[in-house]
Image: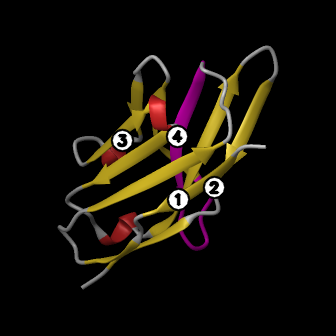
Amino acid sequence: QVQLVESGGGLVQPGGSLRLSCAASGSIFSYNVMSWYRQAPGKQRELVATMTSTGMTNYEDSVKGRFTISRDNAKNTVYLQMNSLKPEDTAVYYCNVLELGLRRVEYWGQGTQVTVSS
């Protein structure tokens, strides 16, 4: 059973930076998509950034140019570098892994809180 463990959240001032990490334990099918989602209070969970095992990336419009997703396939780890943070980035951030084998299997992390406030 794959488990995702996130780290790197915290409190940061507007304009600051944080780097989130998500390490997957266990074996993951080599063809997969790793993503970061976020959920702010009273709002639906939204996709922030995604990266395939072949290196293709996609970002939600509001984070383009500020956030960068990357991954280390050897370590089954995905990162989210967040720069120029804004108060509206405040949310719980969740890591997601989607295996694209014959059977699609999805895993979620427990979430890490990111608070942007002065």
**Residue where numbered disc 4 is placed:** 35
- Callout 3: 10 Å neighbours few (<14), some, many (20+)? few
State the residue at coordinates (30%, 81%). 117
Q: Do the residues labelled 4 and 1 touch (CB within 8 Å)?
A: no
Disc on the earlier residue, 3 or 4: 4
| Residue 6: mark | 1
Q: Do the residues labelled 3 and 2 touch (CB within 8 Å)?
A: no
Pair 4/1: label in front: 1
At numbered mark 2, what does the secondary structure look like: helix, strand or loop? loop
> Residue 99: x, y in percent?
68, 27
Pair 3/4: label in front: 4
Q: In this view, does 104 lie to the left or right of 118?
A: right
The disc labelled 4 sits on which kind of residue?
Ser
Disc on the earlier residue, 4 or 1: 1
State the residue at coordinates (22%, 56%). 83
Pair 1/3: label in front: 1
Q: What stretch is highlighted in magenta?
A: 31-45
14 vs 78, nearest the viewer: 78
State the residue at coordinates (41%, 34%). 72
Q: Is residue 52 left or right of residue 72?
A: right
* Number of numbered discs overlaid on the protein picture: 4
Q: Are marks 2 and 4 in contact (CB under 8 Å)?
A: no
State the residue at coordinates (59%, 45%). 24
Q: Is residue 25 left or right of residue 16?
A: right
As for residue 34 lying within the magenta part, the answer is yes
**Residue where numbered disc 3 is placed:** 61
Q: Quadrant of residue 55?
A: top left
**Residue where numbered disc 2 is placed:** 109
> Residue 52: x, y in percent?
49, 24
